[in-house]
């Protein structure tokens, strides 16, 4: 039976750190479903469609990866997709408490699906979508931190200076 993992997140936008986790996750799982949480309550820089599009373009050459959206509980979605694992990247210490809390709650909700953390590559240890957006907003060089198409989208978005609804 195929071992399927869900890699959930906001992906606002996808970074090279995320792509690294997907590629390395495929050494463990047969198939990875990258799933964007549909959360209309949160303000994102990019719309859901834009985030989906950037993920599709960034991951198009990697086999055994699917991109999807979900709402409600992650564990309900994971069970519905027959996943055996939740994949998350772990960066510096600051991630730990949030990730630990979330993993414990998820385990309480469904003990049959294991959360697997991959240590983020050293190159990406202090990067995040938020910090990259901050740098991009003020014209900082973010080359190599995000796929080139995302770099372009960020430049365009900040030139327009708008926020997704
Ligand atoms: O990239 P993010 O924003 O850190 O991802 C957070 C995400 C989407 C993984 C998390 O918010 C989530 O799983 N939300 C779904 C709601 C849920 O299942 N909550 C209970 C577990 S805490």
Image: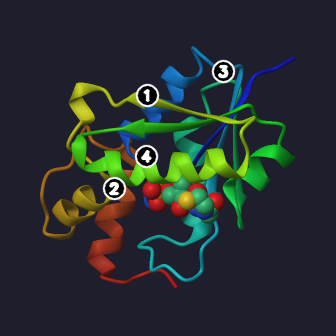
Residue carrying label 3: 29
Q: Earlier in the sequence, mark 2 or mark 1?
A: 1
| Residue 61 drawn at (x, y percent) | 60, 28
Q: Earlier in the sequence, mark 4 or mark 2?
A: 4
Find out whether the residues at labels 2 and 1 contact each other: C-beta distance under 8 Å: no
Q: Nearer the viewer, mark 4 or mark 3?
A: 4
Q: Is mark 2 within 8 Å of ligand 1?
A: yes
For label 3, count other residues whose C-alpha is less than 10 Å away and answer few (under 14), some (14-19) or many (20+): some
> In front here: 1 or 127?
1
Query: Which element is circle 3 on?
Result: loop
Query: Which element is circle 4 on?
Result: helix
Residue carrying label 2: 129
Residue carrying label 4: 100
Q: Which mark is residue 118?
A: 1
The residue furthest front is 108
Q: Nearer the viewer, mark 4 or mark 2?
A: 4
Query: Which element is circle 2 on?
Result: helix
């Amino acid at each position: 039976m195929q071992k399927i993992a869900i890699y959930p997140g906001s992906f606002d936008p996808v970074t090279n750190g995320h792509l690294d986790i997907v590629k390395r996750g495929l050494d463990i799982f047969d198939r990875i479903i990258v799933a964007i949480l549909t959360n209309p309550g949160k303000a994102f820089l990019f719309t859901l469609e834009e985030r989906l599009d950037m993920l599709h373009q960034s991951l198009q050459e990697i086999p055994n990866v699917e991109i999807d959206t979900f709402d409600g509980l992650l564990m309900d979605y994971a069970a519905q997709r027959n996943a055996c694992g939740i994949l998350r990247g772990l960066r510096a210490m600051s991630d730990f408490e949030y990730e630990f809390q979330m993993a414990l709650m998820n385990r309480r909700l469904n003990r049959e699906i294991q959360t697997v953390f991959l240590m983020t590559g050293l190159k990406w240890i202090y990067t995040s979508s938020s910090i990259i957006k901050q740098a991009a907003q003020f014209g900082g060089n973010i080359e190599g931190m995000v796929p080139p198409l995302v770099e372009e989208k960020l430049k365009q978005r900040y030139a327009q200076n708008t926020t997704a609804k």
